[in-house]
Image: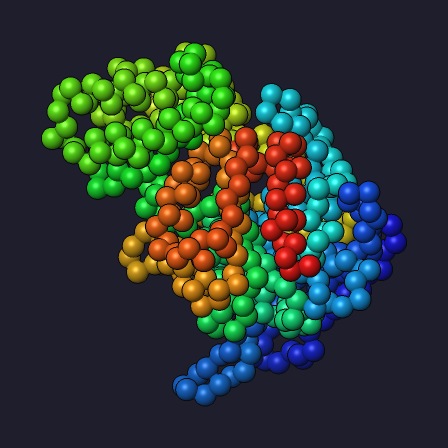
Amino acid sequence: MTTAETPSTTPDSASPSKPDVKDQLVTTSHTVVINGQTIPYTATCGTIVLKEESEKDGASEGDKPRATIFFIAYTRLDVDDKATRPITFSFNGGPGSSSVWLHLGLLGPRRVAMGDAGALTPPPYRLTANEYSLLDVTDLVFIDPVGTGFSRAVEGEKAKPFLSFKKDIESVGDFIRLYATRNQRWLSPKYLIGESYGTTRAAGLSGYLQERHGLYLNGLMLVSSILDWHTVEASPANDLPYVLFLPSMTATAWYHRRLAPDLQGDLRAALEQAEAFALNDYAAALMKGAALPPEERARILAGLTRLTGLSEDFLDRSNLRVSEFRFFKELLRGERRTVGRLDARFTGVERDHAAEGIEFDPSYSAIAGPYSAAMNDYVRRDLKFESDLPYEILSGKVNQQWTFDHDNRMVSVSDTLRSAMANNPHLRVFVANGYYDLATPYFATEYTFNHLNLNDEQRRNVVMAYYEAGHMMYVHLPSLARQKQDLAQFISPAL
């Protein structure tokens, strides 16, 4: 590997009214082997200054620095015409998460070697070449929103305004516009890929980029999608999540062999039974509430016991409604173990085995250490970017201060996506679902897309894929290999 460090600064000079904030960029050169082909590429890593027009008493004060956005961009070198080369902008969720998971787990030229459920690698951890990287078919730009990674509000500016649904979409969208402008990528096929809350951001950006900047996308890639919070946030007035979580609970019980013998054969067959029961008998029963007849209640209890692996007594005491957090604790309570939220294949051991809720998510604990160690070493050792700031992998501060400022309602960007697809009939959507994901269950995603009110032509632009893993399905190597094929095929029309 050859290395060429090229720091870059903004052309604006400092003035008393503007902090002296400059871009800090480093570019290095590398190669990676994908499908037997050696891919030469550059990695540009660092922060650029995000500015906004400022006014005082109705008079413009010019552009004012508001934040520095950290990003890592990979650009394939052996390409003659940028207009023929797709570019994909990537981010994760949280909403306080950096882009590290998609970066070092799925898309980038390096990936974390951490093992998998039941066979985790002990520390210290390492990176390895990612033979499943998407860099062979698209350039990649990984974006850390303000408060994550090394991205920060500039001195004298508060971070709080950025920690909201609306401002987050605006700031990430404005970064994408700036990057496309500076790097002459307006005529390239353009994609977004987000995971978890990053899918909310991606759907919001599909509307914002079109409406604010006239930047039309070729496609969205949604990994573990959540577009409508009504589908996952249960309340006394909202029974829908109980229905939509049921098939993922069935998948989890199947994985841990807690189902009846006749359901333990084929996973898809078990899920088909769970889906039919959820949409018909179970949904109808919950709609009736206290008016549910005793004989029907008994039948629903028997069906839930069969499809969840939980006892009929527990389900009865739960009034037929088991939240995912109680399920994590209850399924393997007899073994004094809990199952993971992000990936129910992972299990953990806690102090209090009689509690109702889990003390920690064993699936997040399994990945947090390897990804944190790998990123902190990689950015300095390989990419040559130096900073003494902590790299915020998943910022609790951001999550605690986040404002879901969505008209006093639960966040929903489903209609934003529908409108974007209506205005841009070429916009395609790929959705990746993990069967063992108990954070953004696949059945809730199907429900959301089935209620977008798309016509037949628009529905053909939506591709659904399913993997026998969890929220971050790429930690499971067979799923990683298939997901690479699926994403490459999704992008292939633009090549």
| Image quarter (top left, top right, bottom left or bottom right) of the C terminus | bottom right
Q: Position of residue 184 (x, y in %)?
A: 69, 72
Q: Quadrant of residue 330?
A: top left
Horizontal side of 30 relative to 450 (left or right) equals right
- Is residue 238 something one can see in this rendering? yes
Q: Residue at x 41, y 43 (%)?
A: 446
Can see residue 252? no
Q: Is residue 62 above or below residue 177?
A: below
Q: Position of residue 375 (x, y in %)?
A: 68, 44
Above or below 401: residue 213: below
What is the basis of the colouring in this image? rainbow
Total numbered badges shown on the rendered structure: 0
Nearer to us in this view, 213 or 263:
263
Residue 462 position in % (x across, y down): 49, 51
Of residue 401 and residue 475, the one placed in the foreground of this image is 475
- Which residue appears at 37% of the width and 27% of the height? 274
| Image-quadrant location for residue 191 | bottom right
At a point 55% along the width and 34% down the height, the residue shown is 467
4 to the left or right of 275 = right
Q: Position of residue 451 (x, y in %)?
A: 34, 50
Locate residue 60 relative to residue 310 in the image: left or right.
right
Residue at 74% x, 38% y is 127
Q: Is residue 279 left or right of residue 471?
A: left
Residue at the extreme right = 2
Vertical order, 490 against 121 (above or below): below
**Outermost residue, front side:** 456
Q: Nearer the viewer, residue 376 or 213?
A: 213
